[in-house]
Image: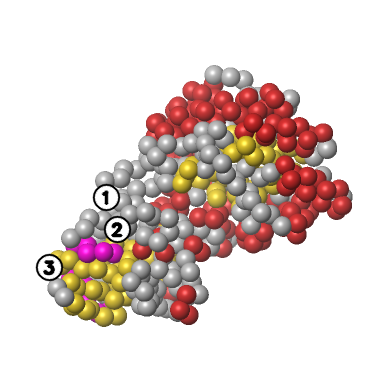
Amino acid sequence: MKPMGAIPADFGMTTPLQIAGQTAAEWVANAGDTPLFVYDFTVIAARIARFRSAMPTGVDLHYAIKANPFAPLLAAIAPLVNGFDIASAGEMDMALPHKLATAISFAGPGKRDDALTAAISAGVTINVESANEAARALDIAERVGVTPRLAVRVNPDIELRGSGMRMGGRASPFGIDADEAAAVARTILAAGADWRGWHIFAGSQALDPAAIIETQAATLELADRLSEAAGAQPPLVNLGGGFGIPYFPGEQPVDIEAIGAALGDRLSERDRTGTRHAIELGRWLVGEAGVYLTRIIDRKHSRGETFLVVDGGLHHQLAATGNLGTVVRRNYPVAIASGAGGATETVSVVGPLCTPLDRLADRVLLPEGRVGDLVAVFMAGAYGLTASPTAFLGHAPPRELLVGAPVEP
């Protein structure tokens, strides 16, 4: 038997599983079939409220829609956050129906001229990732006759300790090296563009509050140095994100109250009148709100092991199979969502794909699962469907439901 992560506290574990006041089976009936992603918006709204309470005044909240761009979710979350952060022209098209262009920022290397043109024309802020991209953006803006909104993404000389994905302190395709960033900002200012400030992202998926506090302090110091060298006060400093969620055994939720208190102390140390600060979050807002429901199609016994074969898998929820940036495969929390519980057994939950990589849970202890029962894979609200190879082997796409969201009048 191998351990698995803890079921998010927002769900607990009733039998059968309840999501937003209804059973998993009821949501499946509502959607029509499995596999199904269910996103509980009450969990997301509570996260946003907790963020607002923990963070000092003047710190905005941006949602990184790469985490989950499901259109009903974007519509529901838009009024509760200050901005959307996007990483492609396609994400811009998803974001614009739900957020003013001036509240959208566009990051990512390799932006094509047509993407830059569309963003500049719409009024979206572009986080330029190189001196060349800044020059291209200025040329395009002159050609279309629009004053561009340009921020400088910085490749910082710091890294977020313990982060799942480190984005600073090394050579990188992301952002402009810290020792070159002020010069690019001066070029943008000299060209008459609307300079929107700095975007400084050092890492993601960190659970150690001390590491996040340390990184935010260093980020503020770096932004101050760069602003002085650029000769201008930035309208916005995007401090990045980095708040992780506890996927695996032994991991603990990040203490954002401690982070907010420390950030407030740092911001009070120096007059930054005219500058707002933002924290950009994706998975911390939506990751634990999602549950992936899949149905047991078969039970197999092979050489002393039991396999529950389900109708979902890595083509929908790649991360849970350990194939999305995980070096050592560990088990996400899973549960038998239907049925009455009872005797337990050690099983592996495997999908329908013709590859041994399609394993949603590896030798975990669960109540006995029968053919027709539902299996719930938790932590499915971020980097799930859109981060998975949905076309692989031609299986049908899953359904998605947003539940618990306010009804539009």
Residue placed furthest toward the front: 171
Q: Which residue is mark 2?
A: 331
Q: CA distance from mark 3 to mark 1?
A: 23 Å
Q: Nearer the viewer, residue 71 or 224?
A: 224
Comparing labels 3 and 1, the label whose residue is closer to the camera: 1
Given contact means CB atoms under 8 Å apart, are the residues at marks 2 and 1 in contact? yes
Comparing labels 2 and 3, the label whose residue is closer to the camera: 2
SS at badge 2: loop
Is any atom of residue 41 visible in this view? no
Q: Residue at x 48, y 43 (%)?
A: 166
Which mark, residue 155? none
Q: Residue at x 46, y 51 (%)?
A: 283
**What percent of the width, then of the height, locates residue 82?**
59, 44
Q: Which residue is mark 1?
A: 249
Question: How would you rate the neighbour count of disc 3 (Cα within 10 Å): few for under 14, some for 14-19, many for 20 or more?
Answer: few
SS at badge 1: loop
**What percent of the width, then of the height, locates residue 2?**
21, 58
Q: Quadrant of the C terminus?
A: bottom right
Q: CA distance from mark 2 to mark 1?
A: 8 Å
**What percent of the width, then of the height, locates residue 90?**
64, 62
Given contact means CB atoms under 8 Å apart, are the residues at marks 3 and 1 in contact? no
Q: Which residue is mark 3?
A: 343
Q: Is residue 259 above or below residue 126?
A: above
Given contact means CB atoms under 8 Å apart, are the residues at marks 2 and 3 in contact? no
Q: Amino acid at mark 3?
A: Ala
Q: Which residues are magenta?
A: 361-372
Upstream in sequence: badge 2 or badge 3:
2
